[in-house]
Amino acid sequence: PRYQGDTFLLEVPGGARIGPRADMTVWTAECHAGACFGVAAINDDPDVRAVVALDGAGARRIGALGRWGCAGLETWREGQTWTIAWSEERVVGVAALDLATGAVTTVRIPTDDRECAPLRHLAVGGRHGLVLTATRSGRAFVPIGPDLRPGVPEPLPPLTGAQQRFADLGDGVLVADFTAASGLQKDRRPDPDGKLEYDEVWSFTGRVGVLRPAPAGWTLADAAPLPHDGEDGRMAGGYAVHLLTRPGHAGVLLAGDGLPSAFALLRGPCPERPAP
């Protein structure tokens, strides 16, 4: 999307500005050894995305990522490498930034999406990769190696929701597969003044389960409905889904917009057995 903005570096904890204002919007950033790097939209040409370095001397471009006509941006860090992935028509772009040298390497991976490919970063079993439509049969996990070469796609079981959230559990991947819709709907009957008003409407369906990775195809286990599955209503914005994990624990939070929120504990420590 076209956007005009300014970016500043601020001192912590005082909040004083470091260096001059940068005529760009930095959408995401990673800092290392006193310098920060980011993915930015440049004010002079907002459709262009670039990797930039920001420090006390200001901002400078160190790598070009081309023109983006699609939304979506995923990043992750492995050691001194910051990896950036984004969606284009029929292609996913991946760039690696060496945080020590500032060198940028870029590749493009073809996909079977005719338009903008939805993509999600996923770290599982010490591997990093992207969940995207990589095969004609559906979505797959595509490992991305340190050299940016994509590995063999590992098909996922059918995910029927319009949205997904993923979280690594160590022995599997927690997945929330859901469709959260909201919008405005015109009243069928006019009010006493003869006017038709719009009401906010929402609907929600979803399930949660554990994906078990396997090269020949992942499997889905322990699938169960999410709270508020199958519900809909008016005068509210519906639910946003957040997966929460820490070692030995996992849960899902449904944050309501004008609705009561809900939390479900999915994994926790086993209760201690009483002493005999």
Image (cartoon, rainbow, N blue to C red):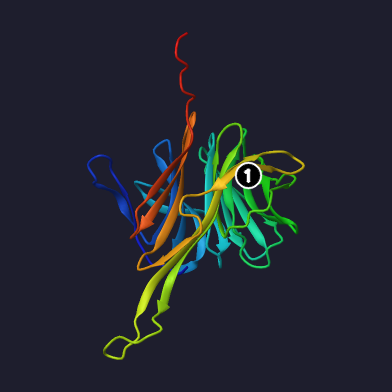
- Where does the image place residue 197, in percent across and percent down from the top left? 34, 82
Q: Return the residue at label 1.
A: 129
Give 80 or 258, whichever is nearer the viewer.
258
Q: Residue at x 55, y 65 (%)?
A: 70
Report the side of 30 relative to 93 (left or right).
left
Q: Residue at x 70, y 45 (%)?
A: 149
Report the side of 135 relative to 38 (left or right).
right
Q: Residue at x 39, y 64 (%)?
A: 237
Q: Is residue 274 above or below residue 84?
A: above
Give 161 or 166, whichever is nearer the viewer.
161
Q: Is residue 107 visible?
A: no
Give 159 or 225, whichever is nearer the viewer.
225
Determine the image quadrant of residue 238: bottom left
Crowd band around label 1 with a 10 angstrom C-alpha radius: few (<14), some (14–19), many (20+):
many
Q: Is residue 259 visible?
A: yes
Find the residue positioned furthest to the front.
Answer: 276
Give 247 or 51, whichever is nearer the viewer.
247
The kind of residue tagged 1 is Gly
Report the side of 232 relative to 85 (left or right).
left
- Where does the image place residue 94, in percent across and percent down from the top left? 61, 51
Q: How many numbered marks have been drawn onto this rendered protein structure?
A: 1
Find the residue positioned furthest to the right.
Answer: 216
- Where does the image place residue 65, in percent across and percent down from the top left? 56, 58
Find the residue positioned furthest to the bottom.
Answer: 194
Q: Which SS class for mark 1?
A: strand
- Where does the image place residue 81, in percent across and percent down from the top left? 55, 39
Find the residue positioned furthest to the top.
Answer: 276
